[in-house]
């Protein structure tokens, strides 16, 4: 439970808010690369952290992200011309490059230096892992891109999508690092094992290959996993151990990576890894960038086709990356299905998550919640992120921003003897107590 | 005319407002029973007096009305499972019964007492008169259900619908107890007998469905003389019009605290109509509309007629929104307005809705100009606002404690002009305030 003030601190990310300032010290996905597919193509309006911006891919292929309004008379550059390495206002022809320099000011005499005094707000941009990233913080504090493994593997090994969500980003992220909900929200309430397995394969909330039925059973049968949390340079390892048929524990281990990434706790060695990154559009809407990758092989076309039509965390999306099952159509809830094969009656793991997270309210009122032992991951996440936001207000920069390599970690599942502590389990599963795999991609040990 | 402060006082019904607190001392219709037809069926989101709630019919047939957000992490129980006498959250399986007790909390160990500390806000409900009623006030002051006659007659002798309206509930109720508007708003212009009969088929003046004497009297006398009598649970509002003799034609409505009104049409043997207004928020309301016949069941053809829109019953879609509504200008037809009826809008209910919505989302009563035919409205406001003020000062309303005194009728009568309203009432109903509870064993 949070006070109203703390809930505001945690959830509000507009310019000048403490959490907004913190988020602005990190690189944020702004678009999928595919959204600006064409050089000199149409500019695109975007909104991030409450700021209305314009993105365009210029003649040389580089992407600019700038404020929308021309400094001359405030016309929106969205209606301008994306041409010859710059965006030119349609009103009086003022032209700007991706760094915000005014490169042509045809309404002043050629000899005038007025042009050199004119600046358009422009944020640094990087293109990495099929996404266009933006840095909206103080220029002198710009960090390296976080070395998420999906960006380290060859492009053929990953799949990236995005989806819009109709709630504050924090409760959606909290839903992802709360792995206790798998015993309920994604449960398949049928005793027919064959039917259950078939649905599992189609929705893939639990894992992809062998042992699927066992894992689902363990998750369903133990709704009170024992949680263990470990902090590291880039975030938190959030692990939940459930009972199995032997004395061993079935560990499902997620990663939270500051400030807005989470990796899912599913993959056994050789399986597909999944992760998500939340980017606030404003305080009641967010983009969820969703990605899957395999370190040691390319994804097949069949796998890509499955993700494209909605599988695991990838939503089946319609136009403009809005999920087909969304708040506007009640997520196409089927009450008959809810009585038989689905705990929610909603199809799709991603859509089940979205429905329940949106239903917490545009911004969840955390003054009324009642947390319990399975919510400790959420508690630790809030402590970390709120302390970082408070520290930044006092002048202490967030440590994680400077530790780009520490983002090269994995999350996943493992089965281990009950007496083993989490660091041991992590080392068994990933070869490192925090799941670090950067050295496999040429980063430091 | 009201001051801005008084207008807000009268019309705002949210939690903590004076009128909102008054309304919360009474049972309110929350749904038609029809809306939750199935045990363990889909739960339904509802909104009453600005409060978002969830209604569900559980395994044993009883109905729960609860706050929608799970106390755990605030997920909406709308997406939960209605099963085995309770509502289970889809997020982590917390389960609640219709009294709001947490009956299962699977994320805590079975031996934990955490469950017993968790409560979901739940309001008492009753099912009565084909409606699901909810009481949203202080539990220790919960009254009996108001003994409206429509619920005392056998189910076959009543018909109940509801309709959405796009304005504050008070101005809609004021439209109903203002019986002088019948001379205009519902007027039939057609002079040709057949056309008039057709227009009259939906008229509100009686059940004969023909341009009879009563219709003529109403149309010819736009200045009925009003008399208002107060009684234990509300007001008798009588409007007397000239007839062809020296007798007066009385049309007598009832207002029953705090949100019910009966229409003034029925002669003995005819059908009685009433309505109950329930604020959704301050600019929308549900109107529960009902009719009943104390002496006989309704025929199937009568029911079909009501369903298609008749008198206070509107023609509605699957979500109880009138087919002729604000968004389509009530399908007003200028040609019809020139030749057939006063508004060009088809249906008495829709004519009422159009004119009431048109007063604004919340009528600005600082700009109105009331006259002698508006005294029913004036008395209604005095009663409501006086009661709400006294409640604010700590004095509970007495009407909730007098449930049986809601068993009254309203209707029409012809009487000599020297008779006062109490005498007319006694002639018409056998009681000077229209009480008929004695016919149902509720005492004299």
Image (cartoon, coloured by chain):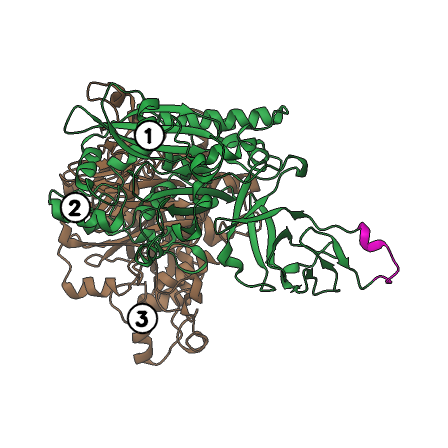
Tell us which disc is closer to us: 3 or 2: 2
Q: Determine which residue is flagged by label 2.
A: A196
Q: Which residue lies furthest to the left in this view?
A: A192
Nearer to me, B95 or A189: A189
Q: How far is the residue under mark 1 from the one under mark 2?
A: 28 Å
Task: Name the quadrant of the C terminus of chain B.
Answer: top left
Q: Dot 2: what SS?
A: helix
Q: Determine which residue is flagged by label 1.
A: B72
Chain identifier, brown in the render: B
Q: Are marks 1 and 3 on the same chain?
A: yes
The quarter of the displayed image where residue B166 is located: bottom left
Pointer 1 or 3: first along the chain: 1
Q: How crowded is mark 2: few (under 14 residues within 10 Å), some or many (20 or more)?
A: many
Q: How far is the residue under mark 1 from the one under mark 3?
A: 57 Å
In the image, residue A183 sits, relative to residue B337, either above or below, namely above
Q: Residue A165 in the image: x percent, y percent?
A: 42, 47
Q: Residue A291 in the image: x percent, y percent?
A: 40, 47
Which residue is rendered at x = 37% and y = 47% of the image? Answer: A292
Q: Determine which residue is flagged by label 3.
A: B200
- Horizontal side of A392 relative to A184 (left or right) equals right
Q: What is chain A's hue in the picture?
A: green
Which residue is rendered at x = 19% and y = 62% of the image? Answer: B303
- Horizontal side of B332 relative to A221 (left or right) equals right
Q: Can residue A245 be seen in this view?
A: yes
Which residue is rendered at x = 32% and y = 51% of the image? Answer: A331
Callout 3: chain: B
Q: Residues within 10 Å of mark 3 (few under 14, many from 20)?
A: many
Q: Residues within 10 Å of mark 1 (few under 14, many from 20)?
A: many
């Amino acid at each position: 439970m949070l006070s109203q003030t703390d809930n505001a601190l945690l959830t509000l990310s507009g310019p000048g808010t403490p959490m907004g300032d913190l988020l602005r010290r990190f690189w944020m996905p702004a678009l999928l690369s595919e959204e600006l597919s064409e050089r000199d193509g149409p500019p695109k309006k975007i909104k991030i952290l409450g700021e209305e911006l314009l993105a365009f891919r210029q003649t040389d292929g580089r992407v600019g992200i700038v404020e929308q309004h021309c400094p001359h008379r405030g016309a929106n550059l969205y209606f301008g011309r994306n041409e010859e390495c710059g965006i030119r206002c349609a009103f009086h022809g003022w032209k700007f490059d991706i760094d915000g320099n005014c490169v042509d000011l045809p309404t002043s005499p050629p000899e005038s230096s007025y042009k050199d005094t004119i600046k358009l707000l422009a944020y640094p941009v990087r293109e990495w892992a099929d996404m266009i990233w933006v840095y909206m913080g103080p220029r002198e504090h710009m960090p390296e891109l976080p070395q998420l493994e999906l960006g380290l593997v060859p492009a053929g090994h990953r799949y990236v999508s995005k989806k819009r969500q109709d709630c504050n980003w924090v409760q959606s992220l909290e839903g992802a690092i709360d792995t206790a909900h798998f015993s309920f929200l994604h449960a398949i309430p049928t005793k027919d094992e064959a039917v259950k397995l078939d649905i599992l394969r189609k929705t893939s909330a639990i894992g992809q290959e062998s042992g699927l039925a066992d894992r689902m059973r363990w998750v369903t049968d133990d709704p009170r996993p024992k949680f263990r949390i470990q902090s590291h340079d880039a975030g938190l390892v959030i692990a939940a151990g459930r009972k199995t048929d032997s004395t061993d524990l079935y560990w499902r281990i997620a990663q939270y990576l500051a400030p807005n990434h989470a990796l899912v706790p599913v993959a056994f060695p050789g399986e597909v890894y999944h992760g998500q990154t939340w980017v606030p559009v404003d305080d009641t809407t967010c983009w969820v960038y969703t990605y899957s990758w395999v370190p040691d092989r390319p994804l097949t076309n069949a796998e890509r086709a499955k993700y494209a039509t909605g599988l695991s965390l990838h939503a089946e999306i319609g136009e403009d990356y809005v999920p087909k099952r969304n708040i506007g159509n009640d997520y196409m809830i089927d009450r008959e299905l809810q009585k038989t094969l689905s705990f929610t009656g909603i199809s799709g793991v991603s859509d089940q998550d979205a429905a329940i997270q949106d239903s917490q309210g545009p911004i969840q009122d955390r003054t009324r919640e009642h947390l319990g032992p399975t919510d400790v991951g959420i508690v630790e996440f809030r402590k970390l992120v709120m302390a970082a936001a408070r520290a930044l207000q006092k002048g202490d920069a967030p440590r994680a921003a400077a530790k780009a390599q520490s983002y090269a970690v994995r999350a996943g599942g493992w089965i281990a003897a009950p007496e083993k502590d989490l660091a041991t389990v992590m080392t068994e599963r990933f070869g490192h107590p925090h799941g670090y795999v950067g050295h496999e991609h040429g980063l430091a040990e | 005319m009201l001051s801005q402060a008084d207008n807000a006082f009268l019309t705002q019904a949210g939690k903590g407002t004076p009128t909102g607190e008054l309304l919360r001392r009474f049972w309110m219709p929350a749904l038609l029973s029809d809306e939750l037809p199935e045990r363990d069926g889909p739960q339904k989101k509802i909104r009453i007096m600005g409060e978002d709630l969830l209604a569900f019919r559980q395994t044993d047939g009883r109905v729960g009305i609860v706050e929608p957000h799970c106390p755990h992490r605030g997920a909406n129980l709308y997406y939960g499972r209605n099963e085995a006498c309770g509502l289970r959250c889809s997020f982590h399986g917390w389960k609640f019964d219709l009294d709001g007790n947490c009956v299962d909390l699977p994320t805590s160990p079975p031996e934990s007492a955490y469950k017993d500390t968790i409560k979901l806000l739940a309001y008492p409900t009753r099912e009565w008169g084909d409606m699901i009623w909810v009481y949203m006030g202080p539990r220790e002051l919960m009254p009996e259900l108001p003994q409206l006659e429509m619920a005392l007659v056998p189910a076959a002798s009543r018909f109940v619908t509801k309709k959405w309206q796009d304005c504050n509930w008070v101005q809609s109720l004021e439209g109903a107890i203002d019986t002088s508007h019948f001379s205009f708003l519902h007027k039939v212009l057609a002079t040709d007998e057949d056309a008039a009969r057709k227009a009259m088929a939906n008229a509100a003046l009686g059940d004969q469905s023909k341009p009879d004497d009563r219709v003529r009297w109403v149309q010819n006398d736009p200045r009925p003389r009003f008399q208002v009598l107060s009684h234990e649970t509300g007001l008798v509002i009588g409007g007397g019009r000239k007839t062809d003799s020296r007798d007066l034609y009385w049309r007598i409505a009832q207002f029953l605290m705090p949100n019910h009104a009966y229409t003034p049409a029925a002669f003995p043997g005819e059908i009685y109509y009433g309505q109950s207004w329930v604020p959704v928020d301050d600019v929308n309301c549900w109107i529960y509309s009902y009719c009943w016949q104390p002496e006989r069941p309704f025929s199937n053809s009568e029911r079909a007629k009501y369903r298609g829109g008749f008198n206070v019953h509107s023609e509605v879609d699957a979500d109880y929104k009138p087919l002729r509504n604000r968004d389509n200008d009530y399908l007003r037809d200028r040609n019809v307005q020139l030749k057939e009826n006063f508004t060009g809008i088809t249906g008495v209910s829709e004519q009422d809705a159009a004119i009431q919505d048109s007063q604004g989302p919340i009528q600005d009563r600082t700009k109105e100009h009331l006259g002698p035919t508006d005294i029913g409205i004036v008395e209604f406001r005095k009663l409501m606002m006086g009661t709400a003020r006294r409640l604010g000062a700590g004095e509970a309303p007495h009407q909730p404690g007098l449930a049986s005194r809601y068993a009254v009728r309203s209707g029409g009568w012809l009487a000599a002009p020297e008779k006062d309203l109490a005498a007319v009432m006694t002639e018409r109903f056998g009681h000077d305030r229209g009480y008929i509870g004695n016919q149902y064993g509720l005492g004299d």
